[in-house]
Amino acid sequence: MTLGEGWTPMLRSKRYANVYVKEEGANPTGSFKARGLALAVTMAKHYGLKKLAVPSAGNAAGALAAYAAAAGIEANIFMPKDVPFANYVEAMMYGANVTLVDGLISDCGRIVAERKEKEGWFDISTLKEPFRIEGKKTMGYELVEQLGWEYPAAVFYPTGGGVGLIGMWKAFAELEELGWVKAGKRPKMIAVQSAGCAPMARAFDSGEKVSQMWQNAETFASGLRVPKPYGDYIMLEILKESGGVALAFPDEQILASLKDWAKNEGIFLSPEGAASTVAYDHLIKTGYLKPEDKVVLFNTGAGLKYTDVTAEAAGLKRPS
Ligand SMILES: Cc1ncc(COP(=O)(O)O)c(C=O)c1O
């Protein structure tokens, strides 16, 4: 089943010769979540599942709702009550059963776990079924193909649950096994978070094998409000193996970069995507990367899905 996901544009920056932006906002429902849920819902239909449930930071909810509608399957969605309004509206329009929760994705996950057996729901949460990662790994295939079957020096990935990062690492192994990628080192994987919710950056800095639950998570990069990623230990291994890092930046810096890229490149990043551009500037400044290093920054969602939260962060009001 498809709604046209994947093969998203690889945009070249106007200002930085070796910076490419993988524009995942071009996917159906405006985010990379479409890739994983297209496959997971297709397989759910194949196996005859009738009722799916998901805890979501927002974009997975919209994507599940769309593919479930296309498949004729019931979608039960639990997401924080302060998700970007677009996430609520899209899920409602696609006909999902939507519950807004006074809490975070971790609280939503708990509700799904408690109710799923009684309700007969299949839990389609991140890394609790095998297919979302298979859908998301296509980002890894595409970026290598779009760069002429060569690896970039680094890949910047706005990290919540981390399925894309884990999926891309798998894609690289598969491409190597197939002999499709020209010689070269795998990219450094850069996990990017907001300072308002940075369990991966904290775990990486302190050399831990798993992350600790982040308390009072708060950021306008709503997709990054994942206080304790389920696959944290896998990501930490990948970061180490790739020679990468996990970094976090305050929302003010993320907003400044979002405005900079909109004004100077014509690219309206999501707050999550703008965390990548901040991280790139930082790693150039510290000398970790050189301007001649080819890098791919993921804009995981369309800026236009966030007009309410971005306007609020920017203090922007409609003139009355
Ligand atoms: C736009 C956006 N970027 C990044 C993420 C984090 O993705 P993942 O959970 O795969 O790390 C999300 C998750 O909701 C998201 O919506």
Image: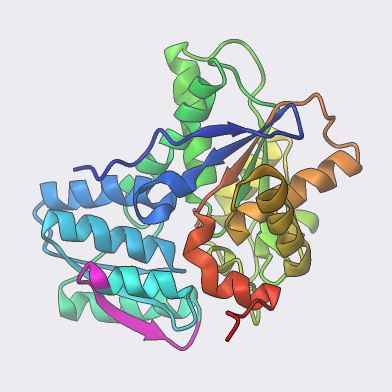
Residue 94 lies in magenta, yes or no?
yes
Give the position of the C terminus as an image quadrant.
bottom right
Residue 114, given in percent of the width and then of the height, sits at 31, 81
**Residue 141 in the image: x percent, y percent?**
46, 27
Q: Is residue 15 left or right of residue 137?
A: right
Q: Is residue 207 visible?
A: no
User: Percent x, y for residue 257?
Assistant: 74, 55
Left or right: residue 58 versus residue 73 is: right
Name which quarter of the figure residue 51 lies in.
Answer: bottom left
Does residue 210 lie above or below 115 as drawn?
Answer: above
In the depicted view, which residue is nearer to us: 314 or 211?
Answer: 314
* Residue sticking out furthest to the front: 320
- Labels in figure, total: 0
Q: Residue at 65% x, 80% y: name it.
A: 215
Q: Is residue 274 visible?
A: yes
On screen, residue 150 versus residue 153, left or right, reads: left
Quarter in which the N terminus is drawn: top left
Assess whether residue 231 is covered by the magenta stretch: no
Tell me if residue 30 comes above or below residue 102 in the rendering: above
- Residue pictured at 83% horizontal, 48% vertical: 282
Residue placed at 15% from the left, 73% from the top?
A: 120
Q: Is residue 181 above or below residue 95?
A: above
Eyeballing the image, is 288 above or below 90?
above
Magenta extent? 93-103
